[in-house]
Amino acid sequence: MTKSPTAMPDSSDVHQASPRRPRVLVAGLFHETHTFLEGTTGLQDFQVTRGLDLLKAEGDSSPLGGVLELARSWNWRMLPTVDYRAQPGAIVEDEVIEAFWSDFLAHAEPFFGEPVDAFYFILHGAMTARSIQDVEGELLSRMRRLPALAEVPVFGVFDLHATLTPAMAERTDCLVGYRENPHTDAREAACISARLLQRCLETGERPHQRLHVTDIVWPPTGTATAKDPMQTLEAMARRMEKLPGVWSVSIVAGFAFADTEFTGVSLLATGTEDSAMSACLAELAAKAAEMKHLGNVTDAPLAEVMPRVIAASKGLTVLVEPSDNIGGGAPGDCTGLLRALLDNLICNSAICIADPAAVRAAEASGKGSKVTLSIGGKGSRIDPGPVALEVEVLALNDGRFELEDRQSHLASMCGDVFDMGRCAVVRHEGITLLLTSIKTPPFDLGQWRSQGIEPTRLSVICVKAAVAHRRAYDPIAARMYWVDTPGPCSSNLKILPYRHLRRPVYPLDS
């Protein structure tokens, strides 16, 4: 979807000549690619923002919004190019990469008549295309071959679950990763990188980067920063950033569902003192190896968890289904937990399923009607398939909602508003189902409240996530259980058919 220009920002931010204002080119590329999913992610799946429309994000909750706000305070002249972003999903079609590159050149080259002082790149960092394993590294290589960008400082921000590669580290001067999981600090991480760029522009000091790729891969469930191993590693990194000559240290948890050479845990140091940076990386690598077993988190079987759910008497039970983790690219329509609710007659419970066909069938039947719907089970061959369920249609609504939490990971993806598409709220006995047309990462309670469902009044609620949901659900949950169900984002990495991953790595090899 392409945003159309509406009220244009003041073009003087782009075109007025002023030798004292640093000219900073800006672009964005955001996709977390799950290479084991069926299908592909095509150009139609991306939201594309071009040119001056990028400047409209100033002040919002996104990383770009934070950078633009700081840029104004420092009197940078922002040179906007293009931003491509899509929800996590299957491998990306090559045409997307070429479309991004064509758009980038079309919007960047007019600025090259005058010197560009820096380039700021807002990334996820885990994009893979059919013919290109390391999309970000490839694009950065192309950018560095442009005479206008060959020698300028390149700074940026990336997701903690990125796949950091040597090409990315070598072709940039300073990339800063998110430090929190759940990702409450995406905007702040972008601002940290922007402040370091300002330091570079003011002082003339220019940092470089050193990358250490470990022999470890952790599932997303093992990468929460409130627990070890990430908690200790992040604390070490923050202390190291106080050392002379060390500008930034990022603990890259990696994205386990990408079959690439460099998938997994990486350590990135930025600064001006090689010896200090190398010492930091060596110390962090040793600690990561020492604690690697703590990140290999797997989930309990349903047969073990459901008796505890049935026995719970007070408060909200949150059932977490990492195998259908929407934030990891899963379809959000797997039926494992839905079947568990039905089999165990769990009343006053709710689950969200992404199923546009079921929404259309509910709309055709009408509010207040009873209809049998084929629900879920359409997005992954691992799932046992759709559940045929007679339901009462309670509500039919637009799915656009404002985020209640402007620091959630959802804010880093979309800013202040998310659109679930057309939605249907249906009920089967005591089970409420929120059916959405667009899969929605469960990172904000506004998802439920916008549809007339108050999550705090439920006894059981199911979320399709691994860790990032916790900022929203920890405050309202009496208990939380992670369960193993059929789905493409299983925490058991040994079942994934890696072909390109470097070997040996833990926990796949002894």
Image (tube, grey):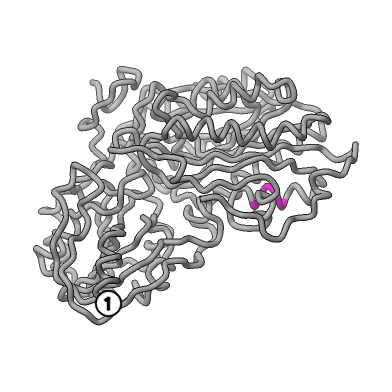
Query: Residue sitting at 10 percent across and 65 percent down?
Result: 344
Whether 68 is among the magenta residues is yes
| Residue that numbered label 1 is attached to | 366
- Where residue 131 appears, as percent x and y from the top left, is 41, 23
- Where residue 438 appears, as percent x and y from the top left, is 38, 57
User: Vertically, is 208 above or below 103?
Assistant: above
Residue extending farthest to the bottom is: 368
Residue 507, picture quadrant: top left
Q: Is 123 on the left or on the right of 298, as rendered?
A: right
Query: Residue sitting at 68 percent across and 47 percent down?
Result: 67
Callout 1 secondary element = loop
10 Å neighbourhood of mark 1: few (<14), some, or many (≥20)? Answer: some
Whether 459 is among the magenta residues is no
- Judge by depth and name the residue closer to the eye, 490 or 304: 490
- Where residue 270 appears, as percent x and y from the top left, is 62, 28
- Judge by depth and name the residue closer to the eye, 24 or 207: 24
Q: Amino acid at mark 1?
A: Gly
From which residue to which does the magenta span run? Answer: 65-69
- Judge by depth and name the residue closer to the eye, 4 or 132: 4
